Image: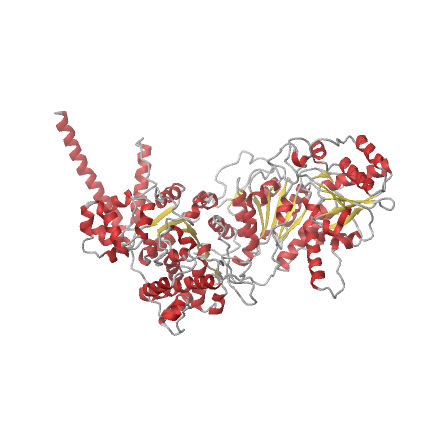
Amino acid sequence: MPTKVDEAVKKDMTAEVAEWIEAFDEVVANDWEQGAALLAALRTRAREAGVPAVGEVVTPYQNTIPKHDEVPYPGDRQLERRIEALLRWNAMAMVHKQNKYDPGIGGHISTYSSQATLLEVGFNHFFHAKYGDQPGDFIYFQGHASPGVYARAFLEGRFDAARLKNFRHELRGEPGLSSYPHPWLMQDFWQFPTVSMGIGPLNAIYQARFMKYLENRNLIEKTDRKIWAFVGDGETDEVDTLGAIGLGSREKLDNLIFVVNCNLQRLDGPVRGNARIIDELEGTFRGAGWNVIKVVWGSDWDELFARDHQGLLLKRMEECVDGDFQRYKAKDGAYLRAEFFGKYPELLKIVEDKTDDELGRLHRGGHDPIKIYNAYKRALEHKGGPTVILAKTVKGYGIASAQARNATHSEKKLTDDGLAAFVKRFDIPLPEGAAKDADFYKPDDSDPALQYLQARRAELGGYMPSREVPPSTFIAPKLDFFRTWLAGSKDRAISTTMGFVNMLNGMLKNPEIGKLIVPIIPDEGRTFGFESVMKAVGIYAPEGQKYVPHDADMLLGYSEKKDGQILEEGITEAGSMASFTAAGTAYSNYKVPMVPFYLYYSMFGFQRIGDMAWAFADSRGKGFLMGGTAGRTTMLGEGLQHQDGHSPVLSGTIPTCITYDPAYVYEMAVIIQDGLRRMYEASENCFYYITMYNEDYLNPAMPEGDGILEGILRGIYKFKSAAKPAQIQLFGSGPILNEAVEAQTILAEKYNIAADVWSVTSYNELRRDCLDTERFNRLHPAEKEKTPYIVQALGNAVGPIVAASDYMKSLPDALSPWLGSRLVSLGTDGFGRSDNREHLRRHFEVDAESIVAAALSKLAREGLIKPKVAEKAFAELGLTTEGTGAAHA
């Protein structure tokens, strides 16, 4: 009897469920978004009632948008198909021809082959170059697909055939094409360097946030512009690619669209051969709060799904992993019939009227314009958060010898038969000889396909990609504006960090440039004494401050604002650098000359984000990197992982990075004023790395005299002369300049040796000047030799040179070709230690006593004093002459 009751209840429940489904179907038929809202409301109610209602993060392995919800394709499919075929040919021919005549020059065919339709639907219907008089969409292209972008520019008439022939030939005396997207090399074309894996997606996320930042601060108009990032599925293994996706949903960046080209392969094999990368990425993005749209199967699969009334087709798909799907595309239709459909007799039945050739041509969604168009349209319409489109494609699509094969990334040229097959497959109107030579092909301008292509771009605002730089209207404050910081700290001991923060506050109040300054901090703003800045201009928060902070009643309470000026990124140097990149290129991308000041622990600067700093230079970025708590001995107590002894060495590897290591606030003021002038008023393509220290000491006023200003900027000036003619020269940088001054006193008072003290603000700039001078002299042997600035500045100064800094000895050593045997370098080679400054400087031998010892030792070697005098001095100074040096300790 109880069993019968249970069965009756179940029957009733089945009927009730059917009624609910019918009602839900009616809602969805009216508006699918209402259906989604209804489901969300039911989940909420279930949680309230204590009913477990876990939402799925991975949906069935099929298209997100069902066929009945698709809108018709608005373009001319025939003409677009022809354009795409021509692009495929010219992109392939560019790489093939180059490698045929210049073996090993490289290039990539397969990435664009898989991505062509994804890009073309965008170029023809979605990518806006302008929105009225406002800048248009930003596109982060997948770097390896650059030949396809060049091929489109060729059809558009922006490049001629000669330019395409010079792909990867940039040093042949005529315009060439860079290997990948490089704004430094093609400043009128590329906007974003992307080929270093993970940098493009990360920068795209922060670019989208920076766009909202500019809008909320009323510095640019609000438009419908989007940031599109084309990403390889293998690229998602890079931590940078997925590491910041939470920011997209947290800040509701509905101006951001990722298109992940899921061709199921890394560079040399499957991404997830034993799983499905689309499932994995769907779960990751959906779990992070993104709108996920899957484009898995092309339109020709719709008919097969309609024939399958048992769900076996979807079941079979979900039994397969990516290694299977790769194999199916690498083989032919007969193999697909036997291995995929053949597992179930019912599946063989639904394809019995299809030829093997038809099965072999079944499309994946990423090659179907209808599916892609609907996904893009849905992404544009989505509000309240970012969208990711997971589009399944085939790597090397259409290249018979390479399609879906593990070696396709290394495919650089085709055989004659391969070229003939390509011509036949895509119906390229080339005679046999021209096809074998891989000649570029462009129809006459009157051709309907080219006219269509031009019309679509005209409708969408012009050509893309394109980079423009408006004439500068920026006027840098004169040095007089910085007079407060040139006057010294009087009788108050301050750090250069505090001096800078005070200076930044002053610049933020400047009526001309204040609104353009973008302060960026990863975290620990209070460590840098940033409270006053945070209170003055607020921290950017797109929703404002929805809570009352615990310190609201304090003078410098925590303040978040919708139009806040500070970007406080949290503990992410990579994310902060991405914001620095967005702000530092805004002068071109948004036509607004934003001035970023990014403050961070110097140790976690170039060491952690060196690749992004290099890309920033490639982007022609501008701004100030402020390396806080700099040096290996000034950050007492922290030890090995925090103490920086090498950032100026690393920054010196970047051609456009101008590095300074100022000892005093007046030096910093001179450098920052000149940086504003050079970068923004004079439009120089460079950026600055300036060290800041947390050691408090008296800051003198800027000395008077000729050459001081020039010396600060060029890298060296005499800070303090000896009381009598000097026998030796002491170089100091940053806080170690104070140690050199103390060493000067010890040498004079204890050993009757006179020494001049020089402030070296930039070894890197001095070396660059030396290299430029040396090159001129080498290439102009008949002309009068030029003299490097370091030699000019030293003039008649005699004696050895002891150079000490808080960085590795290789920094001053870089000047040794021009200073010869005079130079003795002291520095902080080796791991850091936890201790105070006194012990740290003694350990690294850069304190005043160690400088004195080095000076006496060198004078003894030069025969200017007796060695016994130096040896006795070592004992008097308390120095240990035996044991392991810091570099090996």
Q: In which quarter of the image is residue 286?
A: top left
Judge by depth and name the residue closer to the eye, 597 or 737.
Answer: 737
Quadrant housing the C terminus: top right
Which is more toward the observer, 145 or 305? 145
Which quadrant holds residue 153?
bottom left
Q: How is the image coloured?
A: secondary structure
Residue 198 versus residue 419 in the image, above or below? above
Q: How many marks?
A: 0
Residue at the far top: name it: 1
Q: Position of residue 34 (x, y in %)?
A: 30, 47
Q: Is residue 505 visible?
A: no
Indicate the quadrant containing the N terminus: top left, top right, bottom left or bottom right.
top left
Residue 263 percent location from the top left of the image: 37, 51
Q: Position of residue 814 (x, y in %)?
A: 69, 48
Determine whether, in the image, residue 28 is placed left or right of residue 611: left
Toward the viewer: 341 or 598? Answer: 341
- Image point 34% across, 59% down: which residue? 398
Provide residue 367's location: percent of width, then percent of height: 33, 56
509 to the left or right of 213: right
